[in-house]
Image (cartoon, helix red, strand yellow):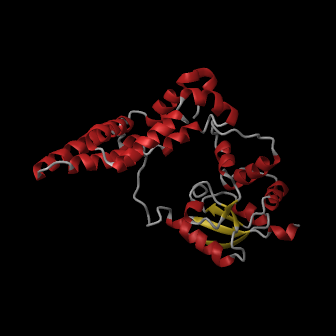
Amino acid sequence: MAGVKVQELGLRFVRVCAEQYWGTCMFPVLFVIGILWSLFCHKKQTARIFLCYAVFLGLTVYNPLFVKYIIPKMNFEDEYYRFFWILPVIPGVAYYAVRIISSGKKKYQRMIAAVIAVAVIMLTGSPMQGIVRNYAMAENLYKVPNDLRAVCSIIHEDSESENPRVVFDIGLNFVARQYDASILLVLNRDAVLYRAGSQVIKMNPEKISYQRQKAIMDVVYYSEDVDMDVFREALIARKTDYLVVPVTNLKHDYIKACGCEAIAQTEERVVYRFDWKEYQ
């Protein structure tokens, strides 16, 4: 987590990470209340699963003493916040809300409990407008852009390989393998984030593998000038089979001159084939 260091915070590191991760959301408090309710009032075996999760995690990855000495040695300081994903707060809150509502003996009691539960969740959660910007409904069942589906279909129809290596533009690079895991990414996540200016990702900018990816990103993502031989060599070294480039990119003539062949165009992107084996 950016700006949160074990060396500076010591035993407060876990608490500060939790505060930044959850923000104003009070679901963890509701989760703890639900555990206490299940222990003293409900006493269902299913509910005790959440207690076991909480106790185990509290003794290990949420233990300030454990974290202070172990996490830095694992070089996992910036990624530590991901441990908060494994605590089943949301499923737990949902479960306890349903159990509390269904515990009412009469219909009107359950209705009142449901209204109260909805109100509490709305008041203690994080409003969508505080998390999601420019929200738009998903274009399809797969929750990915339709253009990605079209591009993947074009590549698989054209490719002789079951696992083609593809340069996706920055708009698709992070979601491409969520839709089609058979496609391999030429540009890895950390390199893309580092080139975009992330202050969290640690990357050696002098490393040859990053320099090659940067040359590709400079052209495909940022329409910058790159020596043609450098760009072509980067494509060859990264074993690039296809490039997916936005129609609005200013380097289409340059990309073609580097040996890439345009094989199809969707509404928003041009798909190029690059036979890197020819240059070996």
Q: Is residue 196 left or right of residue 41?
A: right
158 versus 175 height, above or below: below
Figure quadrant of residue 51: top left
Residue 105 coordinates in the image, percent (x, y) = 14, 50
> Which of 180 and 261 lies nearest the eye of the viewer?
180
Q: Residue at x 78, y 47 (%)?
A: 211
Q: Residue at x 39, y 37 (%)?
A: 28
19 versus 226 height, above or below: above
Q: Residue at x 49, y 34 (%)?
A: 58
Is residue 39 visible in the rendered image? The answer is: yes
Residue 265 coordinates in the image, percent (x, y) = 61, 71
> Which of 176 and 196 lies nearest the eye of the viewer?
176
Is residue 4 visible in the rendered image? The answer is: no
Q: Is residue 85 left or right of residue 152?
A: left
Total number of numbered discs in the rendering: 0
Q: Is residue 264 left or right of residue 29?
A: right
- The quadrant of the rendering that contains the N terminus is top right
Residue 246 coordinates in the image, percent (x, y) = 61, 60
Q: Residue at x 61, y 36 (%)?
A: 78
Figure quadrant of residue 220: bottom right
> Which of 267 and 66 lies nearest the eye of the viewer?
66
Residue 93 coordinates in the image, percent (x, y) = 34, 44
221 versus 22 height, above or below: below
- The quadrant of the rendering that contains the C terminus is bottom right
